[in-house]
Image (cartoon, rainbow, N blue to C red):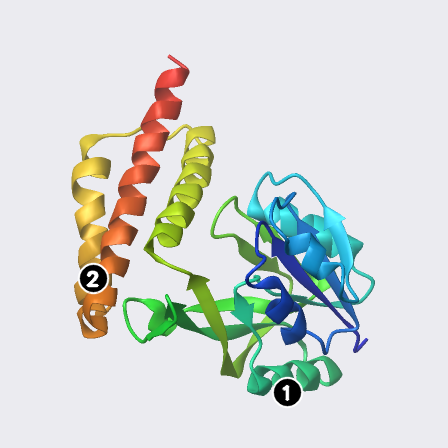
């Protein structure tokens, strides 16, 4: 019961994939689930001891759940390509699968980096995700910002992984657009409609939360960019939802 399958979802991650694979080299199996990358992601991955699965992307949960179903081992470690397992977390992972103490999964906190600079506030100081879990007890749900449904208790690691999420501001905007489109689709399928509150109030409120409430101003100009882009993401989500609503009329 101590063997681990590491899963890395990818789409055009040529600048990350080699370091991502190295980061989970402790795993007994590494699966790359790729959404038909057009850069050198797969060319680089093929030089490593990994299993590569190509699957058309529909949503984050379906992509990860599909890969989990292909895993040989009971413990799963999910690694986004822009994350790195630190030595402290690696030690906790190996110890936890040997002696899980009745936990079926574990939260890990992340140190967030924006264009190579560590962001200490802006809401990321509380960033945590479930990354290690038992295959039989956990599954993903939700189209974007997916969450894990668990059948049992969850523990916490003391150490943090590194999260190099955005290469530059344009990359940040691109990701926010991608997330907004998926979330808009999810809201549309739930029958949600757009009103003035969504486009006039929610974006500035989101800016206020990240920049003031979550202390983004302490991160200087980087904190301002994070808050501004979070607000942009909210506005974009509802513009896309409005477009979907009106296509049906």
Residue occupying image coordinates x 64% and y 47%: 63
**Residue 115 in sight from this viewpoint:** yes
Q: Residue 139 location, x and y as percent?
A: 64, 55
Mark in the foreground, 1 or 2: 2
Quarter of the picture holding the N terminus: bottom right
Q: Nearer the viewer, residue 202 or 227?
A: 227
Q: Secondary structure at mark 2?
A: helix
Q: Residue 14 location, x and y as percent?
A: 59, 57
Cα–Cα gap, marks 1 and 2 = 36 Å
Q: Is residue 130 left or right of residue 98?
A: left
Which residue carries the number 2 mark? Answer: 224
Q: Residue 166 location, x and y as percent?
A: 41, 60
Which residue carries the number 1 mark? Answer: 91
Quarter of the picture holding the C terminus: top left
- Image quarter for residue 210? bottom left
Q: Nearer the viewer, residue 38 or 103?
A: 38
- Image quarter for residue 134? bottom right
**Residue 100 in sight from this viewpoint:** no
Q: Secondary structure at mark 1?
A: helix
């Amino acid at each position: 019961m101590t063997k681990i399958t590491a899963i890395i979802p990818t789409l055009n991650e040529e600048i990350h994939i080699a370091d991502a694979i190295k980061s989970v080299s402790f795993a007994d199996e590494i699966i790359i689930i790729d959404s038909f990358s057009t850069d050198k992601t797969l060319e680089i991955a093929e030089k490593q001891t990994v299993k590569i699965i190509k699957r058309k992307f529909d949503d984050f949960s379906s992509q990860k759940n599909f890969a989990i179903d292909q895993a040989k081992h009971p413990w799963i470690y999910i690694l986004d390509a822009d994350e790195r397992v630190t030595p402290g977390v690696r030690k906790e992972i190996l110890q936890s699968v040997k002696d899980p103490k009745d936990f079926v999964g574990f939260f890990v906190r992340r140190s967030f980096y924006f264009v190579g600079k560590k962001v200490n506030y802006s809401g990321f100081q509380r960033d945590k995700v479930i990354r290690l879990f038992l295959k039989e007890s956990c599954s993903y749900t939700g189209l974007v910002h997916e969450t894990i449904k668990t059948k049992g208790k969850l523990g916490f690691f003391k150490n943090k992984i590194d999260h190099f999420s955005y290469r530059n501001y344009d990359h940040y905007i691109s990701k926010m657009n991608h997330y907004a489109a998926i979330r808009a689709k999810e809201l549309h399928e739930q029958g949600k409609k757009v009103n003035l509150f969504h486009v006039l109030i929610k974006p500035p409120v989101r800016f206020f939360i990240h920049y003031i409430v979550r202390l983004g101003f302490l991160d200087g100009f980087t904190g301002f960019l994070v808050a501004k882009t979070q607000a942009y993401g909210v506005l974009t989500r509802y513009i896309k939802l409005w477009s979907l609503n009106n296509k049906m009329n």
